[in-house]
Amino acid sequence: MSGGWRPTRAFGRAAAVGLALLVIGTGLRRGDVAVLGIPLLGVALWSVRTAPHAAPTARSRLEGGPVHEGDTLTWRVDVEPVDGLREVLAHLPADRWTETTPAHGHVAATARGDGTAVPVALGVRPTRWGVRRMGPAQVSAVGDLGSFVWSWPEQRTETVVVVPKPGDFTSRAALPHPVGLVGQHRSTRPGGGTELADIRPFRTGDRLRRIHWPVSLRTGALHVTTTYADEDAEVRVVVDAVRDVGHRDPARGRLTSLDVAVEAAGAVAAHYLSTGDRVGLSVLGGGGLVEVPAVGGHHQLARILVGLGRAEPARGTLGEERLLRAQLTRAVSPGAVVVLLSGLVSAEPLGQAVRLARSGHVVVVVDTLPPELADPALLASDAVAVTGIEDPGVARLVWRLRLLEREREVHRCAAAGIPVVPWRGAGSLDAVLRGLGRRRRSVAVAR
């Protein structure tokens, strides 16, 4: 057939069986056998008579842009009908973190006969953040009685960025080193702010609304109030994607180290953007380069969440190692507060944190390793999954040694003046930031 239409096996069986019954019945002079083959031959002849000859046109798309995990997208296919087209079939296979409605991913629709496009829709619900690749999508059209079929030659793979949902995070502690011009953090220099600094005699150029009338009436001379300037800070959120440790099981409330890091990064970014600070994002060692410059504003959170959705754990390729070395040598803006979110099982991010701290940056390391993996009494199944060693006893021993090395690296960070705190949601960084603020305001002591 022309236009890409080809006969189906059902058509071949009907024609072959009908012709065989007719020949056998004629040869054996058995009218009852010949009568059985006539309907099958009639179906085959009718299918040839009404078979379509032109190839239809198909268009597919995913309705919806970047979507949060748990939301539902719609995969839609529109097929322009041709003479003889009766039904349209479509199939979209999903990955392990995507659910389809219906679950098997097959949908069908019947042509209405009025010349309008045949729509086919399938619901897609991503259950985890990241770059979800669905497909290859397959679309087919069927003629009368299912005798001829056409397959869309383009088997497209649909890709969508699933944005993570930020966790819950609030902090009442001020950032220790604001360096901007306008914000909500109190500066050490006087300027146009909201917090009272001093009351002094009136000078030429002072604004009249600054006059402090109680002191002026008591002293007989005009006095004005001065305030501390308000500044904004820059926060650089760094996510360690060199290695993803753990097993994700939402039903049991278990997450991987990268899941916790992404959730915490979104929460930290959302909080400090709401306070008027500038927030940037860097993903170290992942499957692709993710860098979001530090700016403020309401749209910055959407950019950061999309960047977090593109974070993927490293696969150990040579290109990823070169990219990681280039990221480690990249400079960080002076005065920026660096928040490193890491499972503390890779040496490169911790080494970068030590170098930044020695260069004068304020660095805070947030431990995102799941609590069940940090427990020395680790289950044998979890130890096998983390280490990849089949022997449970050896796997637990190897992971125990890795936890001891991890503890030594944490002490190394503490010796360099870098606090390491576990992620516990709201208020996780308050005590650390208050301590860093007091240390910044204290007198510097030379070593």
Image (cartoon, grey):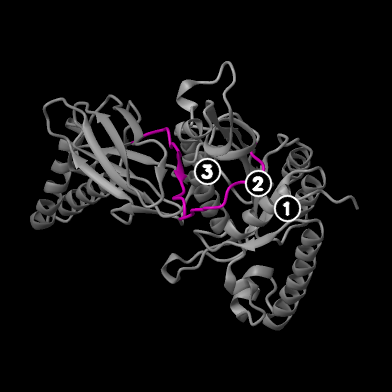
Within-10-Å neighbours for mark 3: few <14, some 14–19, many 20+: many
Indicate which disc, 3 or 2, sits on the residue closer to the N terminus: 2
Residue 218 x/y as whole percent: 49, 35
Q: Is residue 262 magenta?
A: no
Q: Nearer the viewer, mark 1 or mark 3?
A: 1
Q: Nearer the viewer, mark 3 or mark 2?
A: 2
Q: Looking at the image, which residue sits at the far top?
A: 204
The secondary structure that dominates the magenta segment is loop
Q: Quadrant of the N terminus?
A: top left
Amino acid type at mark 2? Pro
User: In the rendered image, is residue 315 in sight?
Assistant: no
Describe the element under mark 2 as helix, strand or loop: loop
Residue 239 x/y as whole percent: 63, 49
Q: Nearer the viewer, residue 303 or 156?
A: 303
User: Which mark is on residue 176?
Assistant: 2
The span from disc 2 to disc 1 (Cα, nearest Å) is 9 Å
Highlighted magenta segment, given as a residue range: 151-178
Q: Mark 1 sits on what residue? A: 439
The span from disc 1 to disc 3 (Cα, nearest Å) is 21 Å
Within-10-Å neighbours for mark 2: few <14, some 14–19, many 20+: many
**Image point (27%, 47%), residue name:** 107
Q: Nearer the viewer, residue 419 or 75?
A: 419
**Image point (58%, 46%), residue name:** 311
Q: Nearer the viewer, residue 216 or 11?
A: 216
Horizontally, is 101 left or right of 176 in the view? Answer: left
Residue 326 x/y as whole percent: 77, 37
Circles 2, 1 touching at the beta carbon (< 8 Å):
yes
Q: Mark 3 sits on what residue? A: 272
